[in-house]
Amino acid sequence: MNQIAVFWHDFLRDTQRDSNVTYCDAYHFERTEYWANELLRLVLIGQKQATASSYQAFITEKSPLPKVGELNIITDFFGHPHGVVETTQVTIMPFKDLTFDIVKREGEDENLESWQKGHMKFFKAEGQELGYEFSDDMLVVFEDFRLIYQKSQSRA
């Protein structure tokens, strides 16, 4: 049994959920080891409660959009599972319309300008990789979530 499967089994057992409950995805945030692990840390301490993604990335990769109630496993950069989050809200809007009241739930920035700068850089790099161009009108999928489980990986 791989470590994701073991972690999921432990989650189901520890939370007394039915064995038929499934997770949508197991993933890490960002594109670099440092940021993937830093954003994971923010989730685990309760500071990061949302994430922003390019709508175009979902289309290009033929991935389903997140839905309220879905469960996901959050991993570190190397794919080791650390927590389970439940999607609580999904908002799709143009990049230019996102306000600090919305984006501060990501827990990463002290102001809107910092958030915009970091996310522009991310979306431009992702766009080069996936074949889309960033613009202020680009749709962003803003997903709120809550951490519902975390467990030490000492047994994995």
Image (spheres, helix red, strand yellow):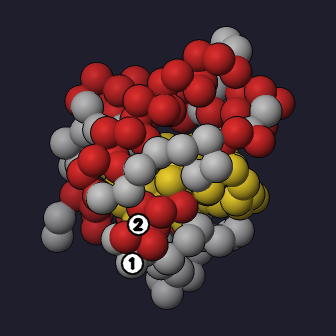
The percent position of residue 94, horizontal first and vertical second, equals 69, 50
Q: Which one is nearer the viewer's eye here, 100 or 85?
A: 100
Binning the other alpha carbons within 10 Å of mark 1 as few (below 14), some (14 to 19) or many (20 upward) gives few
Is the residue 65 above or below the residue 46 in the image? below
Q: Is residue 78 left or right of residue 38?
A: left
Q: Secondary structure at mark 1?
A: loop
Q: Residue furthest bottom?
A: 20
For the residues labelled 2 and 1, the Cα–Cα distance comes to 14 Å
Instruction: Please state the horizontal and vertical placement of residue 58, each as a whole percent of the image.
Output: 45, 67
Residue in the image at 43% along x and 41% along y: 123
Which residue is depicted at the point 48% across and 24% down?
A: 118
Can residue 92 be seen here? The reply is: yes
Who comes first in sequence, dot 2 or dot 1? 2
Spot occupied by residue 114 in the image (x, y as percentages of width and height): 59, 16
Residue appearing at x 70%, y 59% in the figure: 92
Identify which residue is drawn at 67% across, 12% down.
Answer: 110
Question: Is residue 151 visible in the rendered structure shown here?
Answer: no
Q: Are marks 2 and 1 in contact (CB under 8 Å)?
A: no
Secondary element under disc 2, as helix, strand or loop, is: strand
Q: Residues within 10 Å of mark 2 (few under 14, many from 20)?
A: few
User: Which residue in the protein does label 1 denote?
Assistant: 62
Front in this rendered view, residue 7 or 70: 70
Name the mark on residue 25: 2
Picture quadrant where residue 125 is located: top left
Report the side of 145 relative to 123 (left or right): right
Please state which amino acid type lies under the numbered disc 1. Lys
